[in-house]
Amino acid sequence: MLKFKTFLLERKRVNMINNITPMLRQKFDRAISPFTYTVKNATTKTTTIIVRAPKDDRGKVKKDIEAKLKTAKMDYASSRSGGSIGSTDVLFDKHNVKITYKPISGGMSETTLNATITELAPALAFMANKKFTGPAAVKNMYAFLASTTGNKYNVYVNNRDAAAGADFISTMPSSSKFQEKMGNALAILDYLYDENEKSPISQVYWGYRAKPSGIPSSHKGDLFIQYKTGNWIGVSLKAGGAKTAEPQLNTYVNKFFDDYGRKSEKTELKDKVYKEIHSTIGLPADWQERTKKAQSIETIIEYEKTNEKGYEALYDKMLDMIRTNIVKQVNSNKDDTIDYIQKQVLKKDENVPLVVVKAFDKKYKFVTDEDQLETFLPKVSSINASVSSSSKQNWFIELKSGKTESIKMNMSVRSNQPKPNNKIAQGFNLAIKFNGLA
């Protein structure tokens, strides 16, 4: 695990210190901040260091670091050697530093990392009775996080989540949105202190994989607050711009059909997508099987390179096929759709109420869309799902009560995987999201 506090790195940097003056080393550290590293090995001519980042984000981290080196006017050369991402050679007068880019463990994506910053950071800070203000707030908050060890503040439900939390903390600076998400974390920290003023809090838990005892594993809370009264609430956290709409349901086409109980319809759609999309570029019917996936991705990459317009047209066709079929399922049975909304979108728990809190910049607000949806659902007399006429990925579920009253759910279906596993390569199983009420 990476250690970001300088004093924890000194022993690992000893060879680098012997070959580069402290002044140059400090200049280098400042240049690539907030990215930090561990030393792999060193010779009299070269020190090799490792910067870790989510697997699919290493290329961007490399570009970011090289841009920072350029801004700092430090000589460097970008190299294709040193792993699948390549490396960066920083050129000092008598010694070179080779930066290599390695994936962190666990297949972490930047999306997951960013979400964790807004969840875990404020929970730990609140339980440590810490507040951070002024221009150095982000810097000081991260310094605090990097100094935390074990489960000192009881934020983690079990040892496995504690280990995951340590990995997340060590990797937070690799996020391309580090400053923004740390600002969001400060907003959520304000929310926790405001909540504590209303009713004193005894404990805040991070609901990463495990949930506190007695709370269902399906609960949508990202944080769980236990008050000194013994009562609980779950907090679902969102982050974005002041006027943006963040997803309140994240699921996939495969699970959507399973949750609706549409096994045969799912098989029919999956076969149709293969026949009209993937078979047309020469992929076998089992192209997504583990033994054939790598070669299939190469075929898709090559097709995109030689026929970009055709590739985009195929993705648009696939997207339209899937979206149209999803809308068909929603319209096919009102009771099934109401049941789906109750169980998969709302996921309400009588014993542990859920609140949705959105952070934007360094502020927060409550999101009440799900509350409105919950109170309207018992009155629904008819349902009409439809596709957007202005977007390839958006669609709607309009819930009607009588002739005059209705609310509309903003939905979307789209590819959400990083290249080269996105779009056509993601196949049938695109992401479905509920983006709030119109």
Image (cartoon, rainbow, N blue to C red):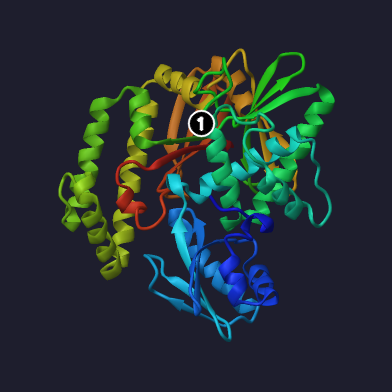
The front one of 114 and 314 is 114
State the image coordinates of residue 379 (x, y, percent, origin top left). Answer: 56, 15
Q: Is residue 248 visible?
A: no
State the image coordinates of residue 424 (x, y, percent, origin top left). Answer: 31, 52
The front one of 391 and 140 is 140
Report the quarter where the C terminus lies.
top right
Query: Which residue is pictured at 70% across the width and 50% down the height?
Result: 142
Residue bearing the label numbered 1: 209
Relative to 416, say whether 405 is above or below. above
State the image coordinates of residue 197 (x, y, percent, origin top left). Answer: 84, 27
The front one of 52 and 204 is 52
Query: Which residue is pictured at 84% across the width and 53% down the height?
Result: 134
Label count reads 1
The front one of 232 and 147 is 147
Query: Which residue is pictured at 53% across the width and 39% down the height?
Result: 164
Relative to 22, say whether 261 is above or below. above
Is 419 on the left or on the right of 131, as rendered?
left
Residue found at the far bottom of this picture: 93
Q: Is residue 382 visible?
A: yes
Secondary structure under badge 1? loop
State the image coordinates of residue 323 (x, y, percent, origin top left). Answer: 37, 41
Is 225 on the left or on the right of 96, as rendered?
right
Quarter of image, res 139: bottom right
Quarter of image, res 20: bottom right
Relative to 21, say whether 431 is above or below. above
The amino acid pointed to by label 1 is Arg
Classify 10 Å Cα crowding around label 1: few (below 14), some (14-19), many (20 and above). Answer: few
